[in-house]
Image (cartoon, coloured by chain):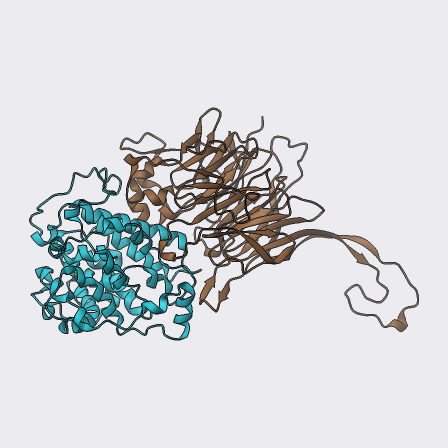
Amino acid sequence: MEFKLEAHRIVSISLGKIYNSRVQRGGIKLHKNLLVSLVLRSARQVYLSDPCPGLYLAGPAGTPAPPPQQPGEPAAGPPAGWGEPPPPAARAAWPEPERPAVPDAPWVGGAEPTATVTGAADAPQGRAADAAEAAWGRVEGPREAAARGAGSPAGGSDAFPEAPQAARRPCACPSGGEDRRGAAAASPGADRRCAPPPSADESPAPPAVCPRKRGAAGVGGGPAGCPAPGSTPLKKPRRNLEEQPGREEDDGAEEMETGNVANLISIFGSSFSGLLRKSSGGGREEEEGEESGPEAAEPGQICCDKPVLRDMNPWSTAIVAF
Amino acid sequence: MWCFSQVKGAVDDDVAEADIISTVEFNHSGELLATGDKGGRVVIFQQEQENKIQSHSRGEYNVYSTFQSHEPEFDYLKSLEIEEKINKIRWLPQKNAAQFLLSTNDKTIKLWKISERDKRPEGYNLKEEDGRYRDPTTVTTLRVPVFRPMDLMVEASPRRIFANAHTYHINSISINSDYETYLSADDLRINLWHLEITDRSFNIVDIKPANMEELTEVITAAEFHPNSCNTFVYSSSKGTIRLCDMRASALCDRHSKLFEEPEDPSNRSFFSEIISSISDVKFSHSGRYMMTRDYLSVKIWDLNMENRPVETYQVHEYLRSKLCSLYENDCIFDKFECCWNGSDSVVMTGSYNNFFRMFDRNTKRDITLEASRENNKPRTVLKPRKVCASGKRKKDEISVDSLDFNKKILHTAWHPKENIIAVATTNNLYIFQDKVN
């Protein structure tokens, strides 16, 4: 349990670092971002291998399956074998073919997505209900629209691939101008990736996801139950980033889940490539994200167990998604 | 017995970012000491000729030349600012009266010529001393201009500019033992240059994957072998070192030797990968060994043995339990350098709280010293420091939690022939000498 929180905290910190790296002088440092993405991958693995998939569903009071005893600081001493592929039952999973459906999401001009990054990072603050909901709402907007057009919910595994595409819908796809140049230089496939958003009926996401969200977010079933969209408090998440350390309560964690899910989905899609490629201040050179590298390297660990997946909370599936 | 000798740089605690020292390097004779800073400047210190009377200490280092090596640039195509920070300085061996060094920032390497002028011609017929032209009709006699002494002037001029060869950030330059070529390494590629030719370079290592999303490691440092002009090594963020032989093929993507130590599974953590990333690699002067620095340790490798280092020295093992905090405050990404003494018997590297460490390979003894203005009386012997890892702190020990992680010593250099060391704190350069008795 504590281990999972630690992993989550590390993920938040890492996201903040990647975000900050975009505005650093001298451009994005490939080495540092690679290391941060490796830490993210490790934290994700730990998070997934933690054998208490129903943790957040059960509520703060009880943990159905406490994780193995952690010595001292979790970061220092994970249980032996935590780096190994997690047991299938505990694995949130993507079927392999789904992953290409979640292509890199080129950034929509820097400001908004980065704000949601910080939103994600600081959501664990616990005061995140508003911030999370608002941030969620911002991303949710197009997704909800897509969801409403959707048919009945399919398996949970279909949920997330839609989100980034839906979120991308309002974006100015790099079909021209400097974005194209940067993206093209970075990867020939960049243009391909910014495909027109998929038809809305593919998206069962919100219906599948929303019912799983925690009560604190005030979510019932169905897309309408998702946290009400609101204006994104761009300033608010940024202020909260500093409060981040030490606010790891269960309640906060629960609330954070829901907000962060959408944030992460919209931000990462399935990789960092868009993140690094399209930073506003710089980084348009070939220093693309490497997060997908680890993804690509571990196909064996991604296996889909649909019933398990449906049972897993949105947070876990979001982690898996990236 | 190490004694304080000098400290260079501003005294005030408010450090201007441009003054942060980013590299320190002695030249081949040790007479010159160059520093580069974040503001793109190079400052060269020269050792005084030894005063035979004061034989108890070697000459002091005084400022010899200061020049702006690199300026901030902007890459308009990529909307990218290029920092002027000097990443590395490497001296060329001296061939004539002038000195030459290579300095590099993230993208451009420059060859600088530093020359002295202590005479100037005087007594021109057509020019006044101040340079104004004389009216030719007033010239009634002729004289031969002669050289007269003048105040020493040290001039630095850029002789070659090696640009546009690196897409990623340059982290290393290394001059070949043939003294004609040198290599420059960035995160993914290593290029071979000829010192005379600036418009092209050969790419000799390229680890960029076809799909950048598959990237798993980057090049962190590279160096030519001190004696074999065909051999060089490069280290990676995964903790491996590859030795390459340029005779084997034009593109040295396939290594001749791979040096890697298996990871200790009991030490596995979220940050294992970060702390195994090698921040510096240096050959011994003999060429038989090489030293690598990762976040917590220094390792000495025998070039003939690839599967593990022959010696490992823990620099600040007490930080292993603090890795999470060090990750949060970015200290875990600090790139410490390391250096050999002239005889390859002692190695030195920096740590936090302005501490630096020396490891004697023969006696297996190590010492921790501090670069601090408190000890700044000349010939004050430095007192060994000790960090207390666990609860009970003895007198004079420092507890881990009271270490100042903003005071880090990343760059150190050892005189090639004598026991004189240069240690760079954030914006000061300390020079220490071994007591000569």
Position of residue A306 in the picture relative to residue B79 (left or right): left
> Farthest right residue?
B140
Picture coordinates of residue B371 (x, y %)? 46, 40
Picture coordinates of residue B329 (x, y %)? 33, 50
Instruction: Residue at 50%, 45% (x, y): give it.
Output: B222
Above or below, A256 against A84 in this view is below
Q: Is residue A126 visible?
A: no
Picture coordinates of residue A15 (x, y %)? 29, 57
Is A283 in front, or is B87? A283
Position of residue A68 in the picture relative to residue B307 (left or right): left
The tint chain A carries is: cyan
Chain in brown in the render: B
Instruction: Residue at 55%, 30% (x, y): give it.
Output: B435
Position of residue A124 in the picture relative to residue B253 (left or right): left
Above or below, A239 against B11 in this view is below
Q: Is residue A222 visible?
A: yes
Is B285 in front, or is B65? B285
Picture coordinates of residue B105 (x, y %)? 52, 55
Q: In which quarter of the view is residue A158 placed?
A: bottom left
Is A149 in front, or is B393? A149
Position of the C terminus of chain B, as image quadrant, is top right
Q: How many labels does the image show?
A: 0
